[in-house]
Amino acid sequence: MKVLFIGNSHTYFNDMPHLFSDMCRKAGEAETDVTMIAYSGRTLAWHEKEYFSVRFNLLYGNYDYCVIQQAAHPFPPEEETIPHAERLIKLCKSVGTAPVLYMTWAEKEKPENQRNMIDTYTKLANETGTLLAPIGRIWAKIRERYPDIELYYRDGQHASVYGDYLIAATFFAVIAKGDVSKLDDMALDFAKGMVLDFEKPRVIEDKESIGCRLEEEKCRRINRTIKEIL
């Protein structure tokens, strides 16, 4: 299975696409090849302006799925988000690639912003018949139900290791049609490229020095919430 991710730092933080691929492999669902077109702070409007990079990948990459992520903080208005997303969705479908919408989450200090994200992504998915990964809804539910699970990186916007586990596990369920309960006892870790300082990105390549073990009980609670909402 080949998956292309289009987005910004909410896609590439903590090497999330690699974690998704790792989940698919370890759970025995599918060997998954991931590619990413993601740049810090970029919107779908920017990706559309850089059309030839996206076009080339979709035309010749033979992708099964393409994950589409709009900027999140701030989240652009519906009248900007929907037209740009619709054109990317149309391009995906024209080459036989299934588009997947990646619903993001609100800032830690502005949970009221989540409603607009949910409404816009849901409307877009319904109007275009596109798969939706409702990560923002799952994120909000876990914040409400399990406050001891810190989903945010220290900047209050990006994902912590648990946040990226949530994201990858949701894609595992939506794209690979995997049963997230298979992940309960795996205690997956982040093996490569954790960003330690977002303001001045510094990447460590030695996986032995950055291994970040996840607590199995917290992962189980995340998995249960994913199953409940999906």
Image: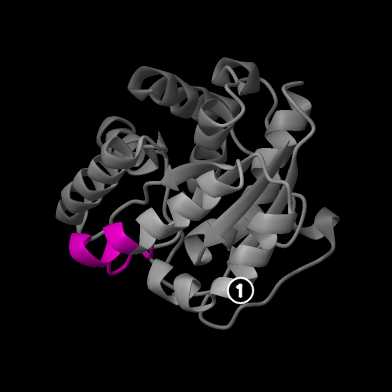
| Residue 53, horizontal then vertical, whole percent | 63, 71
Rendered-image quadrant of the N terminus: top right
For the record, the magenta segment spans 70-83
Q: Nearer the viewer, residue 25 or 120?
A: 120
Q: Nearer the viewer, residue 110 or 43?
A: 43
Q: Does 51 appear above or below 24?
A: below
| Residue 93, horizontal then vertical, whole percent | 52, 44
Left-right relation of 37 to 29: left
Can residue 204 be seen? yes
Instruction: Indicate the quadrant where residue 230 lies.
Output: top left
Instruction: Indicate the quadrant where residue 60 lies.
Output: bottom right
| Residue 138, horizontal then vertical, whole percent | 35, 35
Instruction: Indicate the quadrant where residue 210 lies.
Output: bottom right
In the image, what residue occupies the spot 41% across and 59% down?
87
In this view, the residue farthest toward the bottom is 200
Q: SS class of the residue under badge 1?
A: helix
User: How many numbered marks does the figure carry?
Assistant: 1
* Residue assigned mark 1: 52
In the image, residue 77 lies in the stretch drawn in magenta? yes
Q: Nearer the viewer, residue 7 or 228?
A: 7
| Residue 221, horizontal then vertical, whole percent | 45, 24
In this view, the residue farthest toward the front is 94
In the image, what residue occupies the spot 71% across and 71% down?
203
* Three-letter residue code for mark 1: Phe
